[in-house]
Image (cartoon, rainbow, N blue to C red):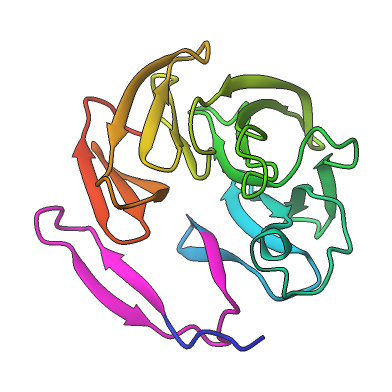
């Protein structure tokens, strides 16, 4: 599998006039996916290594990384190597180098984990579960909530079940709301997991992820980038 020569960088320092440029990573990335900015560095997840299909990543203030690994390459294309590991969420402590699975899908209920997001004080981690949505339109539309512990995650529980598409990228705000990308929109949930709003994208587009810039929530679709100004922020 060949590497892509560049990734797109969007400069949002001037929200009214965003600038888009190409950046050429060295070494190059192989199918770049989720990314997270932390202390001046960008941490990428990418497909093409021993893991199956790395998808999303977050980094805590203490330098602990959580990332998801699913079967997306195999599920969507069937032209990659067969999965060798169970789906799951990994924890990597950059201070010690320790890496381990902290949420696995070996029991069959937690299939194809996707997006990740901390709550405002990083005591909870939200994850999205796509399941085998490509073949099973009714399955795997779940957003989970996990308690963050010193050594990993605990007390996984269902936070919300979306009513269309499947949840992809996920974000939170300082007031406890959770934003889940669900195909044609961003669904907004309160702290109890109740749907309280929906931000739609163009009818012919599919939303896949989001990013906060102050009060602006940027929504990344397969065809376009959208933004909406909200009365809240991420932190």
Q: Is residue 181 above or below residue 222?
A: above
Callout count = 0
Q: Position of residue 22 (x, y in %)?
A: 33, 81
Q: Is residue 119 above or below residue 19?
A: above
212 relative to 1 in the view: left or right:
left
Residue at horizontal 21%, vertical 39%?
228
Q: Is residue 159 a member of the stretch shown in magenta?
A: no
179 relative to 29 in the view: left or right:
left
In the rendered image, is residue 45 in sight? yes
In the rendered image, is residue 60 in sight? no
Q: Position of residue 156 (x, y in %)?
A: 75, 24
Q: Is residue 33 above or below residue 185?
A: below
Magenta stretch in the rendered image: 7-34
Q: In the rendered view of the protein, which quadrant contains the C terminus? A: top left
Q: Position of residue 203 (x, y in %)?
A: 27, 45
Q: Position of residue 209 (x, y in %)?
A: 43, 49
Residue at horizontal 68%, vertical 65%?
73
Residue at horizontal 87%, vertical 58%?
85
Residue at horizontal 49%, vertical 57%?
39
Q: Is residue 11 a member of the stretch shown in magenta?
A: yes
Q: Residue furthest left?
A: 16
Q: In the rendered view of the protein, which quadrant contains the N terminus? A: bottom right
131 relative to 61 in the view: left or right:
right
Q: Determine which quarter of the picture holds residue 196.
A: top left
Viewer-proximal residue among 36 and 190: 190
């Amino acid at each position: 599998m060949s590497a892509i020569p560049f990734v797109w960088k969007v400069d949002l320092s001037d929200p009214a006039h965003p600038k888009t440029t190409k950046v050429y990573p060295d070494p190059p990335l192989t199918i770049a996916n989720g990314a997270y900015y932390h202390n001046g560095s960008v941490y990428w997840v990418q497909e093409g290594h021993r893991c199956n299909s790395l998808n999303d990543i977050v980094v805590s203030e203490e330098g602990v990384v959580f990332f998801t690994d699913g079967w997306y390459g195999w599920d969507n294309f069937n032209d990659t190597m067969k999965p060798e590991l169970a789906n799951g969420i990994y924890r990597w402590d950059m201070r010690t180098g320790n890496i381990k699975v902290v949420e696995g899908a070996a029991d069959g209920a937690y299939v194809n984990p996707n997006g990740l997001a901390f709550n405002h004080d990083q005591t909870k981690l939200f994850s999205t579960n796509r399941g085998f949505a490509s073949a099973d339109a009714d399955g795997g539309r779940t957003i989970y909530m996990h308690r963050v512990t010193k050594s990993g995650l605990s007390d996984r529980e269902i936070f919300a079940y979306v009513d269309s598409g499947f949840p992809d990228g996920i974000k939170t705000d300082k007031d406890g709301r959770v934003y889940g990308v669900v195909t044609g929109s961003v669904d907004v949930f309160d702290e109890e997991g109740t749907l309280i709003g929906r931000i739609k994208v163009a009818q012919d587009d599919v939303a896949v992820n989001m990013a906060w810039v102050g009060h602006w929530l940027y929504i990344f679709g397969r065809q376009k980038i959208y933004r909406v100004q909200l009365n809240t922020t991420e932190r």
